[in-house]
Amino acid sequence: MKRFLIAEVTVAVFVFNLASCSRGAGDALAPAPVTVQAATPKTALHAFTSDQELRSYLKDLADKQKRRISRRQSIFGLAAPAAKSVAPSAVAGYADESITNVQHAGVDEGGIVKLHGEHLVVLHRGRLFTVALGDADLTPISSVDAFGPDIDPRGTWYDEMLISQDTIVVIGYSYQRGGTEVGLFHIDAGGTLAYQSTYHLRSNDYYSSRNYASRLIGSKLIFYSPLYLNLWGGDPFDSFPAVRKWHRGATQGEFRRIVPATRIYHPANSTDDDYDTALHTVTICDLAGGSFDCKATSVIGPAGRVFYVSPQAVYVWVTAWTYERDKAQSKSMLYRMPLDGSSPSAVGVSGSPVDQFSFLESEDEYLNVLVRTGSAGDGMWSAEGTTAGTALLRMHLASFSDGTQSIPASNYQKLPNPEGYALQNRFVGNYLLYGTGTGWWYPQKKNSAVLYAVRWTDGTVHKIALAHGIDRIEQMGDAAVVVGTDGSDLHFSAISLSGSPEEKVDYIRKGASQGELRSHAFFYKPEDQDTGMLGLPISIPVRAGYRHLFDESSAILFLRNDGLRFREIGELNANPEKAKDDSCRASCVDWYGNSQPLFCAWSRDCIARLRIGRGDH
């Protein structure tokens, strides 16, 4: 467990590894904003007309599920599964400029470091900090608790932050109070922080080892959460998505439902066989003017899920598993929930994606998805397993309807199935890249692996031999960088995607491993399409991936990309001996990481400092 406190510039740098950051830090080269004019579905899902109709439907569903479980018990002698515990989702904000390694440019993701004018804003171990950016210094300005003054933070995790204009949104989940906490803070031009208010939302927790619960597009805060329905006890409406403003002595009666029956949509196929039913909810809150006006849309479906946010819509892929004697079968449904508030649509699909990076809504009005048989979705550590088959689904957006239709087999292209665990995948330019590595486990001795590059427009498959596993795939201009270990050393492979995809260079950092696993731990600062700088936290060799939750990174390594040739600029070392006890009260394990590389764009001095004497900063 780390015990840090920002009390001076050096501590600010080493605790959060805010390596030479600046107001000029540009967007990571995420795919360009998509300008899809989605074809209108022939039909959409049907909403319930009233609470009475919804209540009747839920009662009927509960009766059917009871009968099915009873039959299953009589056949197998199995006990009914315990109901899942309830937990909520996340919220976000907007900054002047993205310093986050996001999937889509223009779609910000909840994270731990954001930029506001001349200041960095950091969410760390239950506290908010601001740091002023200067040509040579990072000066601490302000710090406050990431929760309200009358809130007991025990049992609460504050994991995501977004900024909209001068409003900072901190999203947490309280196991003590049983709901999502959304804290609003004001930040002024001088970087001073002030607490404003807290809202509680009723929902289940969205937790994933890869994905993020919240997104921000303009002033619209978007978050997804599944709410697992307990159909057999009490009034189900008592657990439906709702919001209340927090104050001392707040009661359950103050919750206001934010999803009426007329915004809850019928499941597109039968979920009778699935006793794990969820209300998949997309909530959009308008943060303009510091308000918190939220509206929600829900669909009823199986509990298993992967979700993806494009600039136009939220996609939720749900999978129901049924077991007959010793056979397991799955059926999946893909929902499209437009961000303009129009009705959701759905279509039957096969298999399941690995995580959010398995999706791309492309400019030609197609949705492209890497799917696998037996995939368990992007829940906590679910994406780290292995499955039997891999395919590329390519479907036109007009294929969505009321869910009575399914995508034909001809839309799935069978792909080579990689050996191993912890599949990584990413759409970069016109290619889908994928392969397997170590993930959260201990590095394996591996001196060969295959990176598959699939041109998604025509299905052409290329195999690229690498001398290491594949633990991270990131965009780097028109190219990609693949990071992985051979069991002892850390490799950075530059992959050219112009012409026939190929590895151009393999830069090896001896005696190192990745210090962080999440996508936000990487950052690439382009200077033009062929040159730029990248940064990644590193740690000691042969360290298990999960140790990043408990151990800080040894350093952040900086490389310069010159036409797909890498050279080391320097590194920023941690200084644990300067750490101080911060009397942590909440979020004392960094699920979302504790290191993030950032770059300055206007000061040569900050780059020079990295070149001179490592560990002196």
Image (spheres, helix red, strand yellow):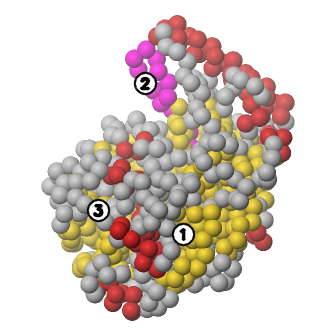
Q: Quadrant of the C terminus?
A: bottom left
Give the mark nearer the N terminus: 1 vs 3: 1
Q: How far across and down, in percent of the image, does residue 352 sit? A: 46, 41
Residue that badge 3 annotates: 539
Q: Earlier in the sequence, mark 3 or mark 2?
A: 2
Q: What residue is disc 2 on?
A: 328
**Residue placed most toward the observer, 242 or 266:** 242
Q: Are marks 2 and 1 in contact (CB under 8 Å)?
A: no
Left or right for 239, reference 540: right
Residue range highlighted in magenta: 321-337
The label on residue 416 is none
Q: CA distance from mark 3 to mark 2?
A: 41 Å
- The relative height of residue 145 versus residue 23 in the rendered view (above or below) is above
Judging by the rendered image, the residue that carries numbered circle 1 is 122
- What crowding class fits label 3: few (fewer than 14 Cα within 10 Å), some (14-19), or many (20 or more)? many
Q: Residue at x 62, y 31 (%)?
A: 277
Give the class, few, some or many, for how many residues have Cα within 10 Å of label 1's Cα (few <14, many ≥20). many
Look at the magenta stretch and give its main secondary structure. strand
Give the residue type at disc 2: Ala
The amino acid on which the numbered mark 1 sits, given as a three-letter code, is: Val
Is 436 a magenta residue?
A: no
- Give residue 43's position: percent from left, percent from top: 70, 45
> Tag 2's secondary structure?
strand
